[in-house]
Image (cartoon, rainbow, N blue to C red):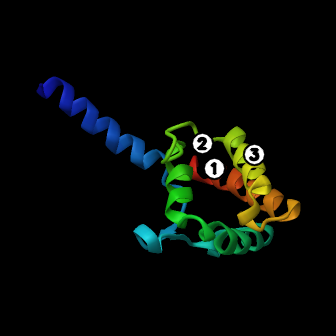
């Protein structure tokens, strides 16, 4: 049993350190990203994200997906293909109140954040 638990514990420590590139403020429902290091275009996109995305879910869901590479609800990989698919889904969702330009900006932000998370 110890032979299995110790390597799993070590893997968890390594796995959590591998996605340390995002600066996160708060916990749970109050979790937010710290945009102080974002390029100006990404700051503007983050402003869209923190208004539009929280209509249906908190930012913790998105941040966890960006940090882990796994969508928390579905358990599916959260990568560039997923950000595009979620963008299309939000564009088609009548309650999202997002236009093409806002979806494009948000998808570009999430792709940039994925890259930052993996640094």
Mark nearest the camera among 3 and 1 is 3
User: SS class of the residue under badge 3?
Assistant: helix
Mark nearest the camera among 2 and 1 is 2
**In the image, is 64 to the left or to the right of 112?**
left
Question: How many labels sit on residues?
Answer: 3
The answer for how far apart the CA atoms under marks 3 and 1 are is 13 Å
**Which residue is drawn at the image coordinates 51% and 58% (left, top)?**
61
Q: In the image, residue 115 lies at what x, y percent?
A: 65, 49
**In the image, is 45 to the left or to the right of 82?**
right
Tell me the tag on residue 114: 1
Q: In the image, residue 4 lies at what x, y percent?
A: 20, 25
Disc 2 crowd, CA 10 A, few/some/many (<14, 14-19, 20+): many
Marks 2 & 1, CB-CB < 8 Å contact: yes
Tell me the tag on residue 84: 3
Task: Residue at the far front: name it.
Answer: 94
Tell me the tag on residue 78: 2
């Amino acid at each position: 049993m110890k032979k299995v638990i110790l390597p799993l514990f070590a893997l968890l420590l390594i796995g959590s350190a591998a996605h340390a590139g995002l600066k996160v403020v708060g916990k749970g429902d109050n979790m937010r990203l710290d945009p102080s290091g974002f390029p100006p275009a990404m700051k503007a996109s983050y402003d869209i994200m923190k208004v539009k995305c929280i209509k249906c879910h908190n930012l913790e869901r998105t941040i966890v997906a960006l940090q882990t590479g796994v969508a928390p609800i579905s358990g599916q990989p959260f990568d560039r293909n997923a950000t595009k698919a979620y963008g299309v889904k939000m564009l088609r969702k009548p309650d999202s109140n997002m236009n093409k330009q806002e979806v494009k900006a948000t998808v570009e932000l999430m792709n940039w954040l994925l890259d930052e998370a993996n640094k």
